[in-house]
Image (cartoon, rainbow, N blue to C red):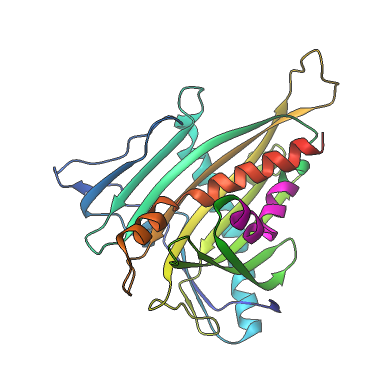
Amino acid sequence: MHVNGRQVMAETHAEMNSDLELDGGQASGSGETLDAPPKKRRVTYWARKQSHPLYTRICLSKDWDERRATLMAIRMQKLQSAYHFIVARCGSLDQPSMRYSDNRFETEQGDLDCDCCDIQTFEGVKSLRQVYDAVMFFMANMEISLSERLGHIAVRDDYAIEDNVVYNSRVILTNSHGVTAESSVVAFPHLFAEGDPAFGGEPCAVLAMDCIDEDELYPYMPKERVRRDASTAIVLTVSQHTPNLSEGGGLVDVTMRRAGFMKLHRPEFPISEGGLQEVHDSITAWGAVMIETIREMVYSQQ
């Protein structure tokens, strides 16, 4: 389904409350290596997604021009917030022994919250644009990748805003237990091929993504679907590649830094324990599928 789309109200909350009161009265914020299992705790208080630096409250009316105007108005702010958050959040992971952090919390309301970040390196690729194009290919075809790699039934509805500038889409995913989850997402991509002083001054690419809170035209269906919200950021940077004997010259290394906050809302309909567990287990699966898709696409072109 492809229709034109635009947007209407946005409020940005730029501060993040980091004081988490756990059952033991302790704060949480530990990172794990790639091989370590993610932590999951019961919390009595969790910094709401509304206070996350990557989150902007976005409400959509039925008017296409208003929808578009609001998204375009917040685009640059979203890109800047994404870039600066990644620089601050992923700095502690910039070492071989610590490239991944995944913290999960179950709220008193029964929601599952996940705060995570990771660093991936695509070594010996042709260019920054090659990896950026692979990221955008995944974004434009994610329902195919999710269906193939997760074995779920995925459907994506596209509400075009501005090609290569702003994208709005809804993804509906049904797992093997017959439980359906939905996400309504807006994405702001940009490739700074020549660099920009506001984004580090060196060539880079930024992708800021956020959830839609309310949509008068395409409302959530909480009595039938589990709502999945995500406020995430991706930054790509490029560096010189050291070739091995079998490689030619002119290749580069592209580093992807990702961070975000995700929430699975408590289902408002009957659901089996197995079905709910599968939904919870898949909270970060989309990110893993993205990396697999990008690697496959980039290295098949070498």
Q: Residue at x 63, y 42 (%)?
A: 292
Q: Examine the image and state in which quarter residue 205 appears.
A: top right
What is the magenta range? 133-148
Front residue (pair 28, 123): 123
Q: Residue 180 colored magenta?
A: no
Measuring 59% from the left and 55% from the top, which residue is drawn there? 146
Q: Position of residue 279 (x, y in %)?
A: 41, 58
In this rendering, the count of numbered labels is: 0
> In the rendered image, is residue 183 in sight?
yes
Name the residue nearer the viewer: 209 or 152. 152
> Does 134 appear in magenta?
yes
Asked whether residue 194 is in view, the answer is no
**Please, which residue is most extreme toward the top here?**
245
Name the residue rendered at 40%, 47% in the picture: 115
Work out whether 268 lies above or below 26: below
Q: Is residue 171 left or right of residue 103?
A: right
Q: Position of residue 142 (x, y in %)?
A: 64, 57
Residue at point 50% right, 49% down? 285
- Location of the N terminus by quadrant is bottom right
Give left or right: position of 39 versus 184. left
**Is residue 56 placed above or below 88 in the rendered structure?**
below
Q: Quadrant of residue 33?
A: top left
Residue 215 placement (x, y as % from top left): 51, 79
